[in-house]
Image (cartoon, rainbow, N blue to C red):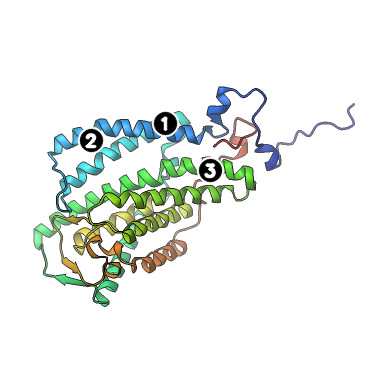
Amino acid sequence: MDANPPDTTPQRSSRLLFHAGPPEGVTLHYILFGPEGLRAGWSIILFVAIFVTLEHCVRPVFQYLLHTQPIKDGLLSTRQTVSLELPSIVALIVSMVLMAFVERRRLNSYGFARAHRARFFFGGLAWGLALLSVLIFLLRLFGLLVFDPHQLTGAAALHYGLLWLLCFLLVALQEELHFRSYLQFTMTRGLRSIFRWFFGERHSNTLGFWTAAFALSSYFGIGHNGNAGESPIGLFSAAIAGLLFCLSLWRTGSLWWAIGFHTSWDWAQSFLYGVPDSGLMARGHLFATHAVGSPWLSGGVTGPEGSILFLPVALIGAGGILLTLPRTHNGYLPLRSEDSSQDRVSILP
């Protein structure tokens, strides 16, 4: 009998389980697939290709059906908003469904867990409305924002209020799907495997998630650069808002809080208080206001997000997330090693 029988226990050190080197005779399968399925880099390339193709096909159809005109003078209508957001939402959802099939995952893996959906969504709605109101109060308190007479009353106010609420739900859904759903999930798992190789298993998920969050939030901020009247502070504020939404995702594993917050924040800016939203003004709003003083304090034509007063309000929002949202997840968690069909993973994402 062998005096030293082999160790048959399933537990292995992270250094053995997540070995850096490829197996002997690297195959095409190894290059394309890792322990969590199709490697993250290939997944992102495939997802972007599907999305861009679908959106290019779908957008002209919606523009024709809705008879939309280009945005002029920074004034945005509800019809233009639907025409801008709905094609992207359709393309994003179809792309995610196809990628979920390819990767053999559930669609709700990409930030749409079923647990506490209503609680998170309506909680986000309340926080978005409250914090935007705090920001408006501060601007008015310091004489940086002046309220003009009402623009709408009665049935017209109710009509536009509901229409804009639906429109900004579409805006929130499109932007969260775009910047913090599939791409955040996939970048996290790709970067996680790289950080695991350098630092071990313990901190790999944290580093992977927040590296992806900073990259995509920066992309989110820069993406607002095409809006009329946008400013450097406004772009920075948009990036900070992206990180705020990522914090809620980190705590809960769900995007529903961010969708709710995003919806009511934009709605309160554009309809309720009648201030610019990233340089755009809504056609049909309840109050009318105008900024006074230096743009870096008042926000100017960018709106409240262009004011440095946005930063303390964002800090309040971060505190609210940490205090009110349960810590049930740490972002997008990795597969357990026993769920993997392979014994090792390389530095390849």
Which label is found at residue 229? none
Residue corresponding to mark 1? 46
* Gap between marks 2 and 3 measured at Cα: 33 Å
Residue 341: x and y, percent?
Answer: 60, 30
Residue 325 occupies which quadrant of the picture?
bottom left
Residue corresponding to mark 3? 191
Cβ atoms at labels 2 and 3 below 8 Å apart: no
| Mark 1, other Cα within 10 Å: few <14 / some 14–19 / many ≥20 | some
Task: Give the vertical position of 1 relative to 96 (above or below).
Answer: above
Residue 240 horizontal side relative to residue 141, left or right? right
Residue 284: x and y, percent?
Answer: 13, 57
Q: Residue drawn at (55%, 50%), measured in percent from left and top? A: 207
Give the secondary structure at mark 1. Answer: helix
Question: Which image quadrant: the C terminus?
Answer: top right
| Mark 2, other Cα within 10 Å: few <14 / some 14–19 / many ≥20 | some
Task: Give the vertical position of 83 relative to 28 (above or below).
Answer: below
Quick one: 6 or 120, which is closer to the camera?
Answer: 6
Residue 13 occupies which quadrant of the picture?
top right
Is residue 199 in view? yes
Residue corresponding to mark 2? 59
Q: Residue drawn at (74%, 36%), measured in percent from left and top? A: 9
Task: Give the vertical position of 142 relative to 45 (above or below).
Answer: below
Name the kind of residue labelled 1 in the image.
Leu
Residue 243 horizontal side relative to residue 94, left or right? right
| Mark 3, other Cα within 10 Å: few <14 / some 14–19 / many ≥20 | many
